[in-house]
Image (spheres, rainbow, N blue to C red):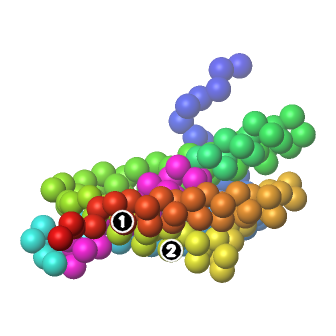
Amino acid sequence: MHASLVPTASDLAGLVAYVLGNPYLFISSSTVMTTGLVVGAVAMSMVPRTAPTLRLAAPPLAVVLVYFGVGSMALATEILLRFHDVLPDATETQFASGLGHFVAAAVGVAILLPHLRHRSRRVWIMANALAVSYWTAQVIVLTPPWFAFAGQLEIVRGLAIGGLAAAALLSAILWRSARPSH
């Protein structure tokens, strides 16, 4: 029998039942955060390009989205590769979630792209520092629930904090080297 690419009413009802029966897989702090970041990017796209707020906020938001997309995809891939043999359905669900977060982040950056041109090196260094600060707070205060997949919370949180510390150090080094000379 050939499977149809068009979902039936039964397929859609099954999907709704699955989401409602497993809301933690779909509605969490990371889902709310993703929605907020993309809504922020959309809102910024409606502001005139010359607005001072947009000039200040667009680069950090773009960097936050890049870290979000890359981090989501990296963790989803790690989960899939590491645990697929033992938990195939759960790892595939997490991978699909990571891919969705990556696409949402890419859409947000694409929306902001017209507002990111002609920014100085110092603006991008500061944007990175602000994004690192934002993500450090997110990881410590609202640790994404999928960090804990298959009992790996402490190692994933440690790796995330270590990566953020390295990014913060890079920002500091680049900031120091970008100081105007007298």
Give the left or right position of residue 180, taking residue 10 as reference: left
- Where the C terminus falls, by quadrant? bottom left
Residue extending farthest to the top is: 1
Give the left or right position of residue 57, taking residue 156 as reference: left
- Where the N terminus falls, by quadrant? top right
Amino acid type, residue under disc 1 in the picture = Trp
Residue 146 visible in the picture: no
Task: Give the structural element (helix, strand or loop) at label 2.
Answer: helix
* Foreground tag (1 vs 2): 1
Q: Residue at x 26, y 58 (%)?
A: 121
Amino acid type, residue under disc 2 in the picture = Ser
- In the picture, the disc for residue 81 is none
Residue 147, placed above or below residue 8:
below
Q: Looking at the magenta stretch, what is its main secondary structure?
A: helix
Q: Residue at x 58, y 72 (%)?
A: 136
Q: Residue at x 80, y 63 (%)?
A: 153
Mark 1 or mark 2: name the one nearer the start of the chain.
2
Residue extending farthest to the right is: 86
Q: Which residue is mark 2?
A: 133
**Residue 41, percent across and down?**
32, 66
Residue extending farthest to the front is: 182
Instruction: Say which quarter of the image contains residue 117.
Output: bottom left
**Residue 176, percent across and down?**
36, 66
* In-front residue for pair 127/169: 169
Q: How far is disc 1 from disc 2 in space, using C-alphas?
A: 15 Å
**Residue 10, percent across and down?**
67, 47
Circle 1 packing at 10 Å, graded few (<14), some (14-19), many (20+), is some
Q: Which residue is mark 1?
A: 175
Q: Residue at x 21, y 79 (%)?
A: 53
Instruction: Say which quarter of the image contains residue 112.
Output: bottom left
* In-front residue for pair 153/2: 153
